Amino acid sequence: MNSVLSSIVTLNNDQKGLALIVDDELSNRVILKSLLKKNGYDVIQAENGAEALRLCIDTRPDIVFMDIRMPVMDGYEAVKRIREIDLPYFLPIIFLTAMTDEDALSKCIDVGGDDFLTKPFSHAILRSKIISMERIKALHHRTNSLSGQLMKDQEMAESVFSGAVLANNVAEDKIDRLLKPAELFSGDVFLTAYAPSQDMNVLLGDFTGHGLAAAIGALPTSEVFRAMTNKGFNPAQILAGINRKLFTLLPTGMFFATQFVSISRDLDYVTISNCGMPDILILDGMTGMIKERVSSNSLPLGITEDIDFQETLVRINIQPGDRFLLISDGVSEARNSLNEYFGQKRVEEAITRKGEMTAFDSIVHSLKSFCQDAPQDDDISLAEIPCTTDILPDWDSRTTDPKPNKNETSEEDPIEFTLKLTGKRLRDADPVPLVINQIQEIEGLSRHRRHLFTILTELYVNALDHGVLRLSSELKNSPEGFTKYFSARQQRLAVLSDGFVSISITSYSSKDQGKIRISVRDSGDGFDVSAYRNKVDVGCNRLFSGRGIKLVEELCESVIYQQSGNCVEAVYFWSKDVDAA
């Protein structure tokens, strides 16, 4: 308030600024000029609206007194034109009139005037109106200053925000995406990250509303998404982690609709969850047409903690080259100048009629043609992700690294721990990230995390699926078999009440190298390891089962199956001088 008063005092000193008088009657100009001089203004004059328009552009006056009826251009038209000038400050305009007709006086305000002064002029009334305009001008100046500072602060915050949320995305140059906020900050979030398993996780989310208020949840969401993906948690666990975080942070009435896709490292299936968003569209790699759609089957995140995200997951077989589209409701709900919605139908028509364009380019072109210059009501986000090898990590986990000298690895003072899951615990828990993080804390093997994750995942999944759940790999002998396999897996997990999987870790280290012995045992009947080894065809890129055994053997120094296959021991040698990541 003190700053505003200071501004007003400054405007009320002896030098008030420049006043423009516009009147075709010389006597009126002389009288008004005298009164304005007494109030501290320098004065310039114009005889018609056209001349006044030129002077406003050339001299930038501080206040304008405009007559209505004048030759060449009347006051109404002149004020309209003046208001079209892009002035960096508030310019008060007071109409001069002898008329008392209410419609005429109302029109003075409608065309852009701020007040009117009736003839003959009263010095007291003139002074009161000048003071009133000076106060309004001071408030405008203060508001513009605060607005400018706020814009600078928001731009700085947006820069930090974008760096923290978007900068760590992977495969950005391989993904077509449109992220168009309705304001400076976007309530839509697009995230990508690689898991230690070499799967790629993608998330497109939409917070309630738009602008800064909607963007406040993006930072914790990105932190949880990246941290849990990096540690190897599965999609259901990652979504649950984000949901828990947002449930504690978001105010009542605010939520986070989400599309989550995990692309398998072998490009043979995707795992999808749609929580409150438009359909996810999967496009055929050959025809470019829609082959699958995944509709929402869950509440958005942040509303309640009681969501079983495992039940929201859909696993779909894909072929290399397939593509999938993630679309926020800002696309379908975009409006044109006729207040019509773009709609889902136009989205799919753009895909059907894309011709030589990609689906992404066709949708963007159609959306732009539809909306043109209409105001944007909501954040618009669209991404097309290709299921091709170049979006996956560029490391090759099948390449074995030079092994350290085993004779220099001491087996004294080993570190040992065991984790055993039984019955219902096997339905809800994924022990692999827990074990990996424990090894990381103990030995600091961050560069070997991916290899260890792959080994542990393959051994644990084999123990759970084939040992405890008694699932046959023969179900996966065709692309269609994957659907049957994972459907059977979910059904058996849902009713699982007994059985166990035990993981034992023994870590030995000496100087900058060491070895880790991983033992996995399950309650199943075991299996014929030799039969699987014989059927693995290393030259076949589309082998649907048995690949895990071969992969673990390539990464480890030794892999020994005991007790008919339901107990396996793998030994992995590591060196801190070897980058296995």
Image (cartoon, grey):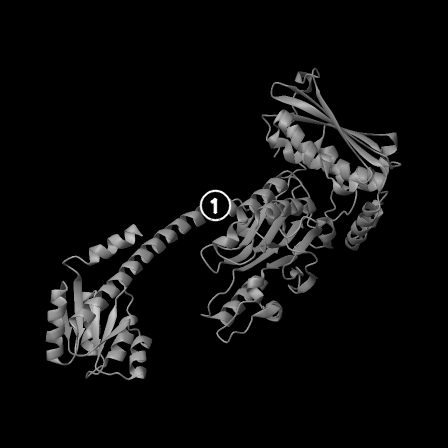
**What is the secondary structure assignment of the residue under circle 1?**
helix
In this orientation, does residue 537 appear?
no
In this orientation, does residue 419 appear?
yes
The quadrant in which residue 293 appears is bottom right
For the C terminus, the quadrant is top right
- Give the image location of residue 493, x and y in percent: 81, 45
- Give the image location of residue 190, x and y in percent: 56, 52
- Give the image location of residue 92, x and y in percent: 25, 68
Spot the residue most to the top: 412
Q: Is residue 527 left or right of residue 126?
A: right
Up the image or down, 511 lies above or below 94; here it is above
> Badge 1 local density, few (<14 within 10 Å), some, or many (20+)?
few
Which residue is disc 1 drawn over?
163
Q: How many marks?
A: 1
Q: Nearer the viewer, residue 510 or 36?
A: 36
Q: Amino acid at mark 1?
A: Gly
- Give the image location of residue 102, x and y in percent: 31, 82
Q: Is residue 133 left or right of residue 287?
A: left
Q: Is residue 278 left or right of residue 31?
A: right
Residue drawn 28% across the image and 84% down it = 101
Residue drawn 69% across the image and 34% down it = 434
Residue drawn 48% across the image and 65% down it = 376
